[in-house]
Image (cartoon, helix red, strand yellow):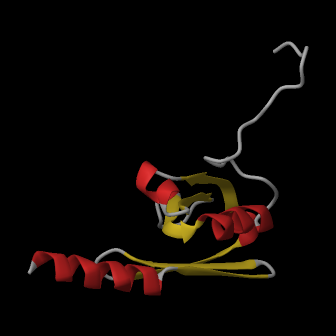
Amino acid sequence: FVTPGFAWFGALRHRDAGWLLDGEQFLMRWRAMGRVTVLTRTRRIQFRKLTADPFQRRASLATFHAAVASGSLGGGIELPHLDAEEARELAFQLGGPASSPDRRLRRPAGSNG
Protein backbone atom coordinates (compact mmCIF):
# COMPACT_ATOMS: atom_id res chain seq x y z
CA PHE A 1 0.00 0.00 0.00
CA VAL A 2 2.79 2.44 0.85
CA THR A 3 4.84 1.77 -2.31
CA PRO A 4 2.09 2.86 -4.76
CA GLY A 5 1.71 6.09 -2.76
CA PHE A 6 5.42 6.88 -3.06
CA ALA A 7 5.37 5.99 -6.77
CA TRP A 8 2.44 8.34 -7.34
CA PHE A 9 4.14 11.17 -5.41
CA GLY A 10 7.40 10.59 -7.34
CA ALA A 11 5.52 10.79 -10.63
CA LEU A 12 3.93 14.09 -9.51
CA ARG A 13 7.34 15.51 -8.50
CA HIS A 14 8.84 14.55 -11.85
CA ARG A 15 5.90 15.98 -13.82
CA ASP A 16 5.87 19.28 -11.93
CA ALA A 17 9.65 19.95 -11.97
CA GLY A 18 10.88 22.31 -14.65
CA TRP A 19 12.43 25.62 -15.56
CA LEU A 20 12.20 28.33 -18.19
CA LEU A 21 14.80 30.94 -19.04
CA ASP A 22 13.39 33.79 -21.13
CA GLY A 23 15.78 36.70 -21.51
CA GLU A 24 16.05 38.32 -18.09
CA GLN A 25 13.31 36.19 -16.49
CA PHE A 26 13.99 32.84 -14.82
CA LEU A 27 11.14 30.57 -13.75
CA MET A 28 11.53 27.39 -11.69
CA ARG A 29 8.79 24.99 -10.59
CA TRP A 30 8.92 21.89 -8.39
CA ARG A 31 6.80 19.97 -5.92
CA ALA A 32 7.39 19.49 -2.22
CA MET A 33 3.99 18.69 -0.67
CA GLY A 34 2.43 21.42 -2.78
CA ARG A 35 3.66 22.86 -6.04
CA VAL A 36 6.19 25.71 -5.72
CA THR A 37 6.82 28.28 -8.47
CA VAL A 38 9.61 30.86 -8.33
CA LEU A 39 10.01 33.73 -10.81
CA THR A 40 13.07 35.98 -10.60
CA ARG A 41 15.37 38.03 -12.78
CA THR A 42 18.53 36.26 -13.92
CA ARG A 43 20.73 39.11 -12.68
CA ARG A 44 19.50 38.43 -9.11
CA ILE A 45 21.04 34.95 -9.10
CA GLN A 46 24.27 35.30 -7.15
CA PHE A 47 25.38 31.68 -6.90
CA ARG A 48 24.56 28.38 -8.58
CA LYS A 49 25.72 24.84 -7.97
CA LEU A 50 24.93 21.31 -9.11
CA THR A 51 24.94 18.36 -6.74
CA ALA A 52 24.14 14.69 -7.12
CA ASP A 53 23.87 11.97 -4.52
CA PRO A 54 24.88 8.38 -5.41
CA PHE A 55 21.32 7.46 -6.42
CA GLN A 56 21.01 10.53 -8.65
CA ARG A 57 24.38 9.81 -10.31
CA ARG A 58 23.25 6.26 -11.04
CA ALA A 59 20.14 7.63 -12.78
CA SER A 60 22.01 10.54 -14.48
CA LEU A 61 20.15 13.14 -12.41
CA ALA A 62 21.30 16.24 -10.53
CA THR A 63 19.93 18.93 -8.23
CA PHE A 64 20.31 22.58 -9.25
CA HIS A 65 20.90 25.01 -6.34
CA ALA A 66 20.84 28.80 -6.59
CA ALA A 67 21.07 31.75 -4.23
CA VAL A 68 18.87 34.71 -5.05
CA ALA A 69 19.63 38.27 -3.95
CA SER A 70 17.20 39.25 -1.17
CA GLY A 71 13.52 38.42 -1.33
CA SER A 72 11.30 36.20 0.78
CA LEU A 73 12.93 32.91 -0.25
CA GLY A 74 15.59 33.11 2.41
CA GLY A 75 18.14 33.33 -0.38
CA GLY A 76 18.21 29.71 -1.51
CA ILE A 77 16.24 27.68 -4.03
CA GLU A 78 16.77 24.22 -5.45
CA LEU A 79 15.35 22.19 -8.29
CA PRO A 80 15.83 18.48 -7.57
CA HIS A 81 16.02 15.50 -9.91
CA LEU A 82 16.81 17.23 -13.20
CA ASP A 83 18.43 15.29 -16.00
CA ALA A 84 22.17 15.85 -15.41
CA GLU A 85 22.81 17.25 -18.90
CA GLU A 86 19.83 19.57 -18.60
CA ALA A 87 21.08 20.79 -15.21
CA ARG A 88 24.53 21.55 -16.66
CA GLU A 89 22.90 23.40 -19.57
CA LEU A 90 20.81 25.47 -17.14
CA ALA A 91 23.87 26.39 -15.07
CA PHE A 92 25.74 27.34 -18.25
CA GLN A 93 22.88 29.50 -19.57
CA LEU A 94 22.76 31.36 -16.27
CA GLY A 95 26.32 32.57 -16.65
CA GLY A 96 28.98 30.06 -17.54
CA PRO A 97 30.23 26.89 -15.92
CA ALA A 98 28.96 26.10 -12.44
CA SER A 99 30.43 23.74 -9.90
CA SER A 100 29.31 20.29 -10.85
CA PRO A 101 29.71 16.78 -9.41
CA ASP A 102 31.09 15.65 -12.80
CA ARG A 103 33.45 18.56 -13.41
CA ARG A 104 36.60 18.90 -11.35
CA LEU A 105 38.97 21.85 -11.45
CA ARG A 106 42.36 20.74 -12.66
CA ARG A 107 45.59 22.66 -12.31
CA PRO A 108 48.04 22.67 -15.16
CA ALA A 109 51.12 20.54 -14.54
CA GLY A 110 53.85 22.44 -12.71
CA SER A 111 51.59 25.18 -11.34
CA ASN A 112 51.90 26.20 -7.71
CA GLY A 113 48.94 27.17 -5.56
Left or right: 105 in relation to 85? right
Q: Quadrant of residue 40?
A: bottom right
Q: Position of residue 102 (x, y in %)?
A: 65, 47
Q: Image height check: is 109 above or below 73?
A: above
As drawn, which residue projects farthest toward the left?
Answer: 1
Q: Nearer the viewer, residue 96 or 102?
A: 102
Q: Nearer the viewer, residue 95 or 39?
A: 95
So how many labels did they put on this image? 0
Q: Image height check: is 112 above or below 33?
A: above
Q: Position of residue 59 (x, y in %)?
A: 49, 63
Q: Position of residue 60 (x, y in %)?
A: 55, 62
Residue appearing at x 68%, y 61% in the figure: 45
Left or right: 18 in relation to 3? right
Residue appearing at x 71%, y 38% in the figure: 104
Residue appearing at x 79%, y 68% in the figure: 93
**Quadrant of the rendering where the C terminus is positioned:** top right
Q: Position of residue 19 (x, y in %)?
A: 61, 79
**Quadrant of the rendering where the N terminus is positioned:** bottom left
